[in-house]
């Protein structure tokens, strides 16, 4: 049985969670609570040597890195995974891969660094956010959002073509993270907002389910601002 190790506070964990649930690949949920340091245990180090989530153990085959896991699942479970998620056509697949390679140093880096400096680091250290860092990473993130609108969504409904693929799942999960730090990337970005509506239609109810904890945190913060 496939074991899936994840924490829904983690963007790539949510992406794989949505993908597994959407494709109905049978798996066992193995929650790893990052806030409680469960990823630092010796037992978990045997699953992921760098002590991060997500990771899988597929009947003894252990793998980490969300993109590698997604590709593995597409190859391993073809009866569950419809072709559009990771097309067999060479050119279509290359377009999906193009985004998967690009996103690490762009969508993920920009959104995650903004989130970490504005929200996570102050909560972990008890010290206020360093405004210079927040400003720097806000600029990085906003450049990414422009590339997203002006390149990735310029001529296509979805990130890598006219059909939804694993690229869109990874993208939407990274793009939600800054909302916890009070930045809604879909505001003031109409093309991104239109894509988001299409993605919700394709990925719900699994998308909302993966975002339950995130949305609770966002709602609580919005209440405290009133
Ligand atoms: N490139 C990796 C990123 C893995 C990663 O950074 N995971 C974070 C959560 S989003 C983590 O486990 N952080 C805990 C730590 O590094 O101590 C992937 O896509 O799977």
Image (cartoon, rainbow, N blue to C red):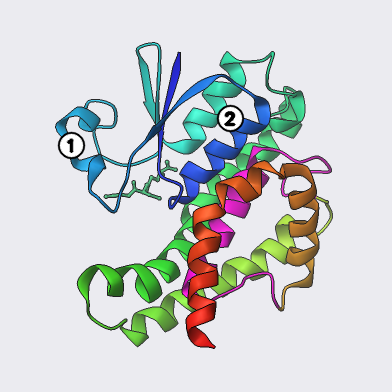
Answer above or below: position of 14 versus 218: above
| Dot 2 beta carbon under 8 Å from ligand 1 | no
On screen, residue 27 versus residue 208, left or right, reads left
| 134 or 101: nearer the viewer | 134
According to the picture, the residue beneath numbered tag 2 turns out to be: 20
| Dot 1 beta carbon under 8 Å from ligand 1 | no
The residue under the point 25% across, 41% down is: 39
Q: Quadrant of residue 85?
A: top right
Answer above or below: position of 179 versus 169: below
| 140 or 120: nearer the viewer | 120
Crowd band around label 2 with a 10 angstrom C-alpha radius: few (<14), some (14–19), many (20+): some
Can you name the residue that lies furthest to the left here?
42
Crowd band around label 1 with a 10 angstrom C-alpha radius: few (<14), some (14–19), many (20+): few
Q: Earlier in the sequence, mark 2 or mark 1?
A: 2
On screen, residue 192 versus residue 129, left or right, reads right
Asked if residue 185 lies in the magenta stretch, the reply is yes
Q: Quadrant of the N terminus?
A: top left
Which stretch appears magenta?
A: 158-187
User: Residue 178, can we see it?
Assistant: yes
Element carrying mark 2: helix
On screen, residue 178 versus residue 171, left or right, reads left
Asked if residue 4 lies in the magenta stretch, the reply is no
Answer above or below: position of 128 versus 142: below
CA distance for labels 2 and 1: 25 Å
The residue under the point 28% across, 27% down is: 47
């Amino acid at each position: 049985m496939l074991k899936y190790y994840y924490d829904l506070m983690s963007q790539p964990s949510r992406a794989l969670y949505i993908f597994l649930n959407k494709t109905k690949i049978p798996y066992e949920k193995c929650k790893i609570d990052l806030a409680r340091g469960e990823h630092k245990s010796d037992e978990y180090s045997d699953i992921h040597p760098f002590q991060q989530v997500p990771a899988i153990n597929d009947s003894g085959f252990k793998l980490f890195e969300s993109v590698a896991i997604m590709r593995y699942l597409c190859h391993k479970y073809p009866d569950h995974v419809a072709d559009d998620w990771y097309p067999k056509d060479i050119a279509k697949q290359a377009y999906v891969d193009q985004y998967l390679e690009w996103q690490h140093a762009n969508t993920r880096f920009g959104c995650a660094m903004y989130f970490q400096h504005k929200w996570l680091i102050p909560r972990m250290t008890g010290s206020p956010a360093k405004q210079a860092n927040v400003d720097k990473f806000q600029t990085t993130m906003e450049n990414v959002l422009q590339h997203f609108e002006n390149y990735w969504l310029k001529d296509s409904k979805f990130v890598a073509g006219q059909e939804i693929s694993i690229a869109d799942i990874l993208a939407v999960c990274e793009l939600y993270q800054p909302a916890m730090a009070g930045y809604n990337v879909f505001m003031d970005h109409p093309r991104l907002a239109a894509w988001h509506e299409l993605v919700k239609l394709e990925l719900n109810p699994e998308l909302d389910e993966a975002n339950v904890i995130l949305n609770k945190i966002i709602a609580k913060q919005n209440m405290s601002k009133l």
